[in-house]
Amino acid sequence: MTSEAVSVPVSVPTNRKKLFIRTWGCQMNVYDSNRMADVLAPLGYGPAATPEEADMVILNTCHIREKASEKVFSDLGRLRLLKNEKAAAGQKMVLAVAGCVAQAEGAEITARAPWVDIVLGPQTYHRLPEMVARASRAAGAQIDTDFPAEQKFDLLPQVSTDGGPIAFLTIQEGCDKFCSFCVVPYTRGAEFSRPVAAILAEAKRLVSGGAREIALLGQNVNAWHGEAPDGSAWTLSRLLYELAEIDGLARIRYTTSHPRDMDDALIGAHGRIPQLMPFLHLPVQSGSDKMLSAMNRQHKADLFFRIADRLREVRPDMALSSDFIVGHPGEKDEDHAATMALVGRVGFALAYSFKYSQRPGTPAAGQPFQVPEDVKDARLQELQAVLRRQQDDFNRACVGRECDILWTGPGRHPGQVAGRTPWLQPVHAMGPASLAGSLARVRIDAAHPNSLSATLLDEKELACA
Ligand code: SAH
Ligand code: SF4
Ligand code: F3S
């Protein structure tokens, strides 16, 4: 889970006008940015490499932590200057704020940044063309932060299929779990699962457009449930078996899961579906039962241990990743020690850890016993040092292993090709960039701080492997 801004490439048949989208937050926001590009393509918007060359800029925002939201306002300050420069040169630039900050702070955005033309929440992207048309006619901001009855998924155009060998597919949105610290139930609304037929159609379309790996997305992806074409009720494991039947789909992942929804059938699927990659992001947040209860996570640390053990039983090469929060209100030294103990016992290939950030409107924000900043800092440092060591150990343990790589494009240096291991590590090897979109076997040679290097195995070696 990242809050770094990424720009999403947009590809459309005509590019009379140019669109620049900056995306923060989770992968669902990346998916949404692509969908906004899809919905604006018929209006003639093509990709812009920078805001400077754009006729429209969309900031697709994240509200999860204070820092993430504040970045939006500093960007808006810079864009105001750009908009003024363009206006002085007789050019118009439409500025839109989308995503979770838009949903949570719609009115505040227009008050703090009246030069914004459009504010729209994550549920109304299908209305974007109409809002753009209105914004070009009328003065003042257009705001749409409804949770409309109609489903945006039914109204958005078909997903574009030029995103390369790794594709994202949102199957579930929203959250009913109301963890004490989290804004998602308020910004994304109630849990909603897309129907089976729509998901299968989108997956097949992505694969026929070149995707070899699909990551199913949802704020609580493993709570997904849907009605199959024959009327029966499916849970995620059943959907995974069905997706595994799609010819040409070599890899399947799903993210982000909640421990409470890791049912037996889903754990079992990891042992039976070879396309399901041996890497699972399963946020635990804390190892202390007292804190898990204060956080309203609705499970104890023991459930997490049992899930980790059973996943490794059915799939011995299974690697786990997780999210942690230090310094939730009421967290004592012994609670932090329990988190450290959980990390030591489970062992993570990757993890994201954050200092608790007070979010307006969430239950934890108003609780007494907020943890002082220096204590949070110290706990985070201690946790991150261990998590970093575990990640390095995991990467080093891969050296000497043979595995299949899904190649995604050229590497950073001439003659290199880059891709991903089954455990999502970035990897590079000497080889032609034309491998992009295919899988080939390598031997891992070395582990670097943020990637692995490898040697492609030739066909003779492959035959004996
Ligand atoms: N649905 C996922 C996580 C969604 S948010 C789950 O159930 O775990 C992504 C991560 O951001 C969370 O796992 C949590 O670690 C972190 N996060 C959410 N709210 C936060 C807050 N108020 N302060 C610090 N970190 C937070
Ligand atoms: Fe947020 Fe909890 Fe829902 Fe995850 S399960 S999105 S942390 S409220
Ligand atoms: Fe951020 Fe919204 Fe995703 S708050 S993490 S962009 S669901």
Image (cartoon, helix red, strand yellow):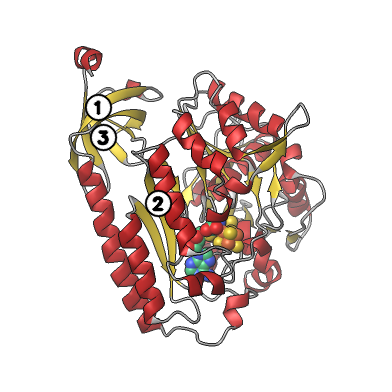
Q: Secondary structure at mark 3?
A: strand
Residue beneath disc 2: 321
Residue beneath disc 1: 442
Q: Is residue 15 left or right of residue 165?
A: right
Q: Nearer the viewer, mark 3 or mark 1?
A: 1
Going from N to C along the chain, the mark reached first, 3 or 1, is: 3
Position in image of residue 235 (x %, y %): 64, 39
Position in image of residue 262 (x %, y %): 54, 48
Q: Is mark 1 within 8 Å of ligand 1?
A: no
Q: Secondary structure at mark 2?
A: strand
Q: Nearer the viewer, mark 2 or mark 1?
A: 2
Badge 2: residue crowd in 10 Å (few <14, some 14–19, many ≥20): some
Residue 82 visible in the current orientation: no
Query: Disc 2 and disc 3: Cα gap in Å?
Result: 22 Å
Residue 146 visible in the current orientation: yes
Which residue extends farthest right? 149
